[in-house]
Image (cartoon, grey):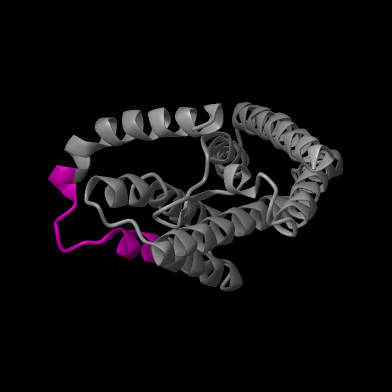
Amino acid sequence: MNLPERITDAEERIRDRALKPMLDLLVPDWIYPNHITGLRIVLVSIAIIFYLRSASLAIQFWLLCAAALTDFIDGPLARLRGQCSRIGAKLDLVADWYLGIWSGVQVLLTGLLPLTIIALMVVPQLGILITNRILASHPNSQQEQLSTMTLGTAVFRARTMERLQFVTVLLGFILILYSKVTSRAIWYRFGIGALYCEIFIVWMLLFQKIACVVKQ
């Protein structure tokens, strides 16, 4: 097991232990992780409907906050109750992209996101997608170590740095939206700061991927 995997294992253990008492108390046995993941998709869809109906931005904001909260529940719940599955992991990935993309669209619609930040976020992400394609095309490469798939159980798993990337970008979007809702510039500054953290992480991940391609 390499260092990134050990860090991910340790981070998941700490997070699961911290959330276990709350999950045991609040989440009945008949609620499965996929139910919570599906709820995230539903909440984002409702937020989109409210946008199309020109509803208050505050309502849309709190719906996105509720959707983001579910992302911190379904993963630990699945691990603690032994309900991890390939379908559930893929559904979680789709739900995360759905939430992240619409949150980003909402921020763009406010006109508060500079084009330079958009470019610094999008360009390395495209580079990661390209390098992942290159690595996946070589079956004898270190793809097993670089993918987000745990061998044996065949369950997709985001590593800690990838999770941190998603958390920072989502936090940045939410804080920028909150600054719009409350008309307080301080939250905008915090949001931009979170996005710069995401930019640092995503560029670091890109350079790591490029190094792996060069080694092939």
Name above or below for residue 115 compared with residue 36. above
Q: Out of 215 and 209, give the one closest to the viewer.
A: 215
Query: In the rendering, at what x and y percent does residue 152 appear?
Result: 41, 53
The image shows a total of numbered marks equal to 0
Query: In the rendering, at what x and y percent does residue 48 appear?
Result: 55, 68
Q: Out of 98 and 87, give the one closest to the viewer.
A: 87
Residue 203 in sight in this render: yes
Q: Is 51 on the left or on the right of 107, as rendered?
A: left
Question: Where is the C terminus found, in terms of image quarters?
Answer: top right
Hey, which quadrant is residue 204 in on the image? Answer: top right
Magenta-colored stretch includes residue 30: yes
In percent of the image, x 58 and y 48: which residue is there?
144
What is the span of residues highlighted in magenta in the rendered image? 24-39
Residue 43 in sight in this render: no
Query: In the rendering, at what x and y percent does residue 24 appear?
Result: 15, 44
Magenta-colored stretch includes residue 112: no
Q: Out of 77 and 216, give the one closest to the viewer.
A: 216
Query: In the rendering, at what x and y percent does residue 72 appear?
Result: 39, 44
In percent of the image, x 59 and y 42: which residue is there?
145
Q: What is the chief secondary structure element of the magenta stretch?
A: helix
In percent of the image, x 74 and y 54: which residue is there?
129
Q: Is 21 on the left or on the right of 102, as rendered?
A: left
In percent of the image, x 13 and y 44: which residue is there?
25
